[in-house]
Amino acid sequence: MAQNRAGMIIALLADLHGNLEALEACLRHAADRGVGRHAFLGDLVGYGADPGPVTDIVAAFASSGAIVVKGNHDAAIEQGARELNELARESIEWTRQALTVQQRQFLASLPLSIRDGSICFVHASAAAPEAWEYIGDNHAARTSIEAAGTSYVFSGHVHDQMLYFLTTVGKIAPFRPISGSAVPVPSHRRWLAIAGSVGQPRDGNRAAAYAVFDDVAEQITFYRVPYDHLAAARKIREAGLPEDLAQRLERAL
């Protein structure tokens, strides 16, 4: 699906996973930095105890022009969770019951990818969005970049922050960003940025993760945002979801 956009600062938010506290913290943080547009890179639901409120927030942004693509957990609400692990399947069954018909319809309506000018927005790999392949190495990054055919690919799915780019000699190079440090990403090269997870980081840092792209300055800044992870974990326990899901927020593993 293609769209047209005006140049502005865009917040990149992936893998929200029903974590309302983390989402609200990232949205406040982005607003303080002059963000004018938002892109939600899939997995709005699953694992967390607030799938309904999170979906409603994203749907409201979508109605105002935000980019929203479908993640594998979003797809599982409609299609089933056979390919997910047992913990994820249990979460999806609970989430499906927690969502309204309208919320489920919104998730089902989301596209797998959106090409918007020089950017491809996709949850997993642009090479086969429906296969939910992870970008875990240079080869996978190159495959996604080449399939997208755009200067920039913005994705999630990996729950970690990473930036890849094609060098002038055609080699792929990875770069692990530092929170709050702007990275030049000139459009004459080709880039793939993984925004990290808003709702469930897994790198030992409990702070929510997202990124901000300035398409005029051609730079991207990755951020980590502290939030009330204990409140989010408490909600998971109160909902009767698996204990491991609460501990993931507390340990970020």
Image (tube, rainbow, N blue to C red):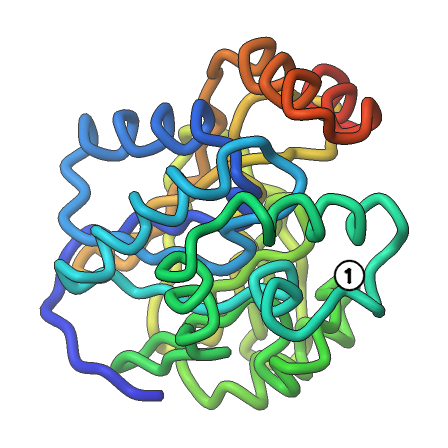
Badge 1 local density, few (<14 within 10 Å), some, or many (20+)? few
Q: In the rendered image, which quarter contains the C terminus?
A: top right
Q: Residue at x 38, y 51 (%)?
A: 12
Residue sitting at the far right: 86
Q: Is residue 49 left or right of residue 219?
A: right
- Residue 171 drawn at (x, y percent): 68, 77
Closer to us: 185 or 237 = 237
Residue type (three-letter) at the residue carrying disc 1:
Gly
- Residue 252 drawn at (x, y percent): 72, 25
Q: Is residue 57 above or below residue 226?
A: below
Q: Is residue 143 above or below residue 103?
A: below
- Residue 49 drawn at (x, y percent): 57, 31
Q: Is residue 221 above or below residue 236?
A: below
Residue of label 1: 136
Q: Residue at x 46, y 59 (%)?
A: 41
Q: Is residue 20 left or right of residue 250?
A: left
- Residue 203 drawn at (x, y percent): 73, 31
Closer to us: 249 or 126 = 249
Q: Is residue 70 above or below residue 230?
A: below
Q: Which picture quadrant has residue 130? A: bottom right
Q: Which picture quadrant has residue 121? A: bottom left
Q: Residue at x 26, y 26 (%)?
A: 28
Closer to us: 252 or 229 = 229
Q: Residue at x 41, y 73 (%)?
A: 110
Q: How many marks?
A: 1
Badge 1 element = loop
Q: In the rendered image, which quarter contains the N terminus?
A: bottom left
